[in-house]
Image (cartoon, rainbow, N blue to C red):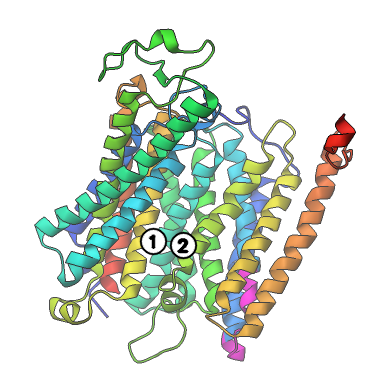
Amino acid sequence: MTDFISLFDPISIILITIGGILIGLGVHFIPVGGAPAAMAQATGVGTGTVQLAAGAGLTGLISAGFMYSMLGNDGLSNIELVQVMLSGAVGAMIMISVTMFIGQLVYVYCVGVPPVSAKVDKDPITGDIQDIYVSKGTEGHGIPTVSFVSGVIGGLLGGMGGSLIYAILMNAGSPGPIESLLVGPSPATIALAGIFSAGVFYVNAVVASYNIGGTIEGFHDPKFKRVPKAVISCLIASLLCAMIAVPIMGGL
Amino acid sequence: MSTAAGGPAGGGISATNVAILGIVGGLAGIYLSTILNGITETTYFSFFGGIGAILAGVWGADAVRRVCSYGLGTGVPSIGMVALGMGIVAAIFGLALCYVLGIPVVLGPIIAIVVAAIIGFIMGTMANKILSMNIPIMERCMVEIAVAGCLVMIALCVTISGTLVFENSILNTDITILSSVIQTGFIALIFIGGAMIILHPFNACLGPDESQDRTLYVGVEKGGIIMAITGVASLVVIDVIPAMLTIVIGLLIWIIYFKKFINLTKRDAYKVIGTGLLPTEEELQ
C-alpha cells in the first residue's frame, strides 16, 4: 500500500486548477446564443454553453491525447507539456471554428439574416455599423466578426485548459521512468485520465455557463465583466476535483 | 432561455420520499447484485445494478425537476451534465480509494456518496453565493443531483462488470471495474447514458402542464433503455446469460413504462385525436 498523503502532489493540483480556470475563461469567449439563437433571434450559435464547450473541449482532448501519445510516453518535459497544450488548443479552435462557420452559413443562406451584434453599435474589430441591421424585436443574429474571433479565442483557452488537465493526470498516473520507457502508460491510465478530465471539464463549463446566464456574444458583451466571479468559482470547483483526482491517479 | 421560470414545483410524492427511494433503492441495487453475485459465484444478479441505477436516476430527475422549475437560464441539460461530472469524479474516487488504501470494497459506494454530497454542496453554495443565482433550493438539489449521479454511475458500472472491485493485484485476472468498464471505454457510454436518465425527463416534459408522475415515468423508461444498452455492453464482459437477463429486464421496464407514460400523456392532454396519414398529392387537388 502506498503512503496516501504523499500522493497529494501540490504542483499537479495547482496545474489542474489552472486548467479548470482556463476552461471557465474560455466559455466566456464563446458566442453562445441558446434557444433564441436557434430561432435567429440572438447573436451566437444556437445551442447551450455546455454543448458548445463540450464539443470543442472534447475534440481538444482527442488532439491533446494524440500529441501526448507521440511525446509523453516517457513522461513529459516542460516544452512537451506546452506542445500537448497547444495541440489540444488547435483541436478545440478548429472544432469551434467549424461549428461557427457552418452555423453562419445556415443563418446567412438558409434563415436569411445578416450577422450582426445588438450589444455594440460598431464591430470593435472591423468597425462595421451594427445597429441598423438588427431586426426589430431581436437581439441580433448570426455570428459577426467580433464574435467569431472571440469564439476562436475561447477554443484556444478551453482546449489549453482541457489538455493541461489531461496531461497532468496522465503524468500523475504514469509509472516510473524505466517501466514507462518499456511499455508506456497503461490503457487504464489513459482511459481514467480521459474520463476524469471530461468530468472536470463539464463541471467548469457548467459553472461558467451559470455565470453568464445562458447567452453571451463574446468579449465585447457587457456580461463579460462577470468573469472574476467565474474565475473564483472555477478555482474552487477544480481545486476540489483535482484534490480528488490526483491521489487516485497516483495511487493506481 | 429561462424554461418554465417560476415558483417551486408541486407534485404527488414529496421530495424526501423520492430521495429515500433513490438512495435506498440505488444502494440496494448495487449491494444486492454484488453480494448475491459473490455468494453464488456467478454474475446472474448483475441486473439488480440496473434497477438501482433506474431508482437513483429517478431521484436525480426529480431533483432536476425541482431546481429547473425556477429557471436556470442555461437549459436543463447543463445540470444533468454537471451531475454526472461531479458523480463520475466522486464515484471513481470512492471505488478506487478502496483499492489504494486496501479497505473492503463494500465501503466504496458509501465513500463515493459522501464525497459527491460534499462536492454538490460546495457547487450549490457557490452557485448561490458567488454566482448569485438565488435559487432557494439550489444547495439541497445540487447535493441530491450529485449523489444521484454518483449512484447511477456506480450502479451502471456494477451492471456491466457484476462486481464492485475496482482493481486487482497484478497476478489476479478476475473481472474488475477498471478492466471491464473504464479500459474498454464503456465509461463514456454510461456517462452520457446516466446523464440522460437524469436530465432528459424534465427536459422532455417541462412546461406549464408538467406533472411529477409523468416526468418520472419518462425517467424510468429512459432508465430501462440505458439498462438494456449496458446489458449489451456487458455481453463482452460477463457471461451471455446474465447480460441477456439485463437486456430483457431493461427492455421490459422500457415497454411497460413507455405505455404508462403514453397513458398519462393522454390523461393530461385536453384531447387526443388521430390525424390519419398525410394526404396524397391527388387528394389535395
Give above or below for B208 relative to A50. Answer: above
Is B46 covered by the magenta stretch?
A: yes
Q: How far apart are marks 2 and 1 (CA)?
A: 7 Å
Q: Label 2, on which residue? A: B188
Give above or below for B255 relative to A130. Answer: below
In the rendered structure, the answer to whether residue A49 lies left or right of residue A240 reads: right
Magenta extent: B38-50
Quadrant where the C terminus of chain A is found in the figure: bottom left
Q: Quadrant of residue B225?
A: bottom right
Question: At 39% from the left edge and 90% from the top edge, which residue is drawn?
Answer: B172
Q: Quadrant of residue A222?
A: top left
On the image, the x and y values in percent for residue B153 come to: 51, 63
Question: At 23% from the left edge and 60% from the top edge, which residue is drawn?
Answer: A67
In the rendered structure, the answer to whether residue A15 lies left or right of residue A197 reads: left
> Dot 2, how many residues are within 10 Å of its Cα: few (below 14), some (14-19), or many (20+)?
some
On the image, the x and y values in percent for residue A199 come to: 40, 55
Nearest the viewer among A86 and A24 is A86
On the image, the x and y values in percent for residue A111 come to: 54, 25
Contact (Cβ within 8 Å) of mark 2 with mark 1:
yes
> Dot 1, how many residues are within 10 Å of its Cα: few (below 14), some (14-19), or many (20+)?
many
In the rendered structure, the answer to whether residue A218 lies left or right of residue B198 reads: left
On the image, the x and y values in percent for residue B95 come to: 42, 71
Q: Label 1, on which residue? A: A195
Nearest the viewer among A182 and B259 is A182
Q: Can you see residue B143? A: no
Question: At 34% from the left edge and 86% from the top edge, which residue is drawn?
Answer: B169
